[in-house]
Amino acid sequence: MSDHLMQNYTRLPVAFTKGEGPWLWDGAGKKYLDAIGGIAVCGLGHAHPQLAQALYEQASTLIHTSNVYQINLQEQLADRLCALASMDRAFFCNSGAEANEAAIKLARLYGHQQGITLPHIIVMEGSFHGRTLATLTATGNRKIQAGFEPLVQGFLRVPYDDVSSVEHIAKTHKEVVAILVEPITGEGGVRLPAPDYLNQLRRICDEKGWLLMLDEIQTGMGRTGHWFAHHHNGIVPDVMTLAKALGNGVPIGACLARGKAAQVFKPGTHGSTFGGNLLACRAALTVVDIIEQQHLVERAKFLGTRMLNGLQALLDNCAGVKTVRGQGLMLGIEVDRPCKPLVEHCLEAGVLVNVTADNVVRLLPPLILSDQEADTIVRTVSDQIRCFLHR
């Protein structure tokens, strides 16, 4: 490992040299089944031939001009995403953190336009929204905030999946302008709220004139068995953020808005040098095409049910397993103790997984898995969990 890299990461002892579909190979030729997908990024798997061809064609033609000029591919992508999400306008950036940063700025500007001097945003305990100073503050994880004080003002934190706490703030705080929430927590441990949680938040926002802002960075692009997780609830947010699987590894983020929220930004209020350039937008348009052509939203729903049922059957009555939960291909197995060693155990067994919230094995496999590959993940992960808990 190079001594010249900043030590931001505790890296696993493997470097991958090739990928194909849900598979990765290391330098020694060992093959691994990817059940984490670059942390929900590679929804189409690795080296998808249609995406590779699109990137080659675009890179051979034009990569970047700047938002000083019209970008036809950016306009096409905005049209496609807004149609899929029932939104009105889109702003493009380079990452999920930047998309959430744009949403936070939009909410503050909206508040000021309403005559609110110190706009506040309600955020949730156990959430994750990024590592910029504003998104770091919005994130409900004290560990990643430590050492970066003073944090950004203007956030009110409540427990996740607790409508009564939001209603209490609605009665006692006059400067709230928005709620920022994940439909399902990712880094927070694949926690699914009550079925009507988002509906209740939508109701409160409508009553108070607040913006409902959904962080769909991990849950979007078909991951949960709908294009976006809030589609399970039959609601539409005022602001929605996307990234991760939107570019299948090509960096791109998006902040979508509708109605009054779509009118907030004006020329000069927010921008990005690289955001929405031709290469990134060609990648995202191709991702949308492939998901539609291969019916991968429906596939994610089917595979998610198959894997959830399989994990529950194999881990039923396994001492130490607390719950197996998920929606679509966003799955979590919670155990009764810290389980980070499981990442290396599964790596040795040829399956890539992730542990989040200290004791939840998180699975975010590509949407292009075969039935057999999905079953292999279920068997291997279940075996490794049993061995870990009973050793």
Image (cartoon, rainbow, N blue to C red):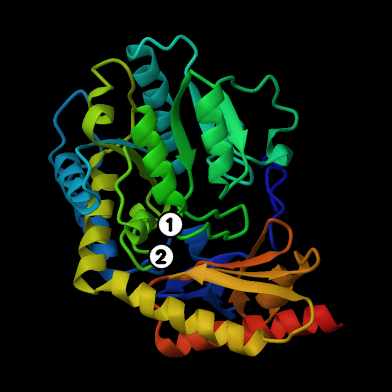
> Does the image show residue 14?
no
Q: Mark number for residue 219?
A: 1
Asked where in the image residue 351 lies, by quadrant, the reply is bottom right
Amino acid tagged 1: Thr
Query: Which percent across, then down, holds residue 33?
Result: 53, 78
Task: Tell me the distance, in whole angstroms, between the alpha carbons under discs 1 and 2.
Answer: 6 Å
Judge left or right: residue 27 versus residue 45: right
> Does the image show residue 273?
yes
Mark 1 or mark 2: whose residue is earlier in sequence:
1
**Between residues 130 and 95, which one lies in front from this camera angle?**
130
Judge left or right: residue 56 versus residue 250: left
Per the image, label 1 sits on a secondary structure element best described as loop
**Between residues 175 and 327, which one lies in front from this camera angle?**
175
Judge left or right: residue 330 versus residue 260: right
Residue at screen point 46% across, 35% down = 179
Residue at screen point 58% across, 47% down = 160
Q: Is residue 265 above or below residue 127?
A: above
Query: Which percent across, then down, holds residue 299?
Result: 33, 77
Few, some or many residues within 10 Å of mark 2 (<14, 14–19, 20+): many
Asked where in the image residue 345 lies, by quadrant, the reply is bottom right
Few, some or many residues within 10 Å of mark 1 (<14, 14–19, 20+): many
**Between residues 48 and 185, which one lies in front from this camera angle?**
185
Per the image, label 2 sits on a secondary structure element best described as loop
Q: Mark number for residue 247?
A: none
Quadrant placement of the C terminus: bottom right
Q: Is residue 75 above or below residue 221?
A: above
Q: Mark number for residue 224?
A: 2
Query: Which percent across, then down, holds residue 384?
Result: 71, 82
Q: Are marks 1 and 2 in contact (CB under 8 Å)?
A: yes
Judge left or right: residue 1 versus residue 331: right
Query: Which percent across, then down, holds residue 31?
Result: 55, 80
Amino acid tagged 2: Thr
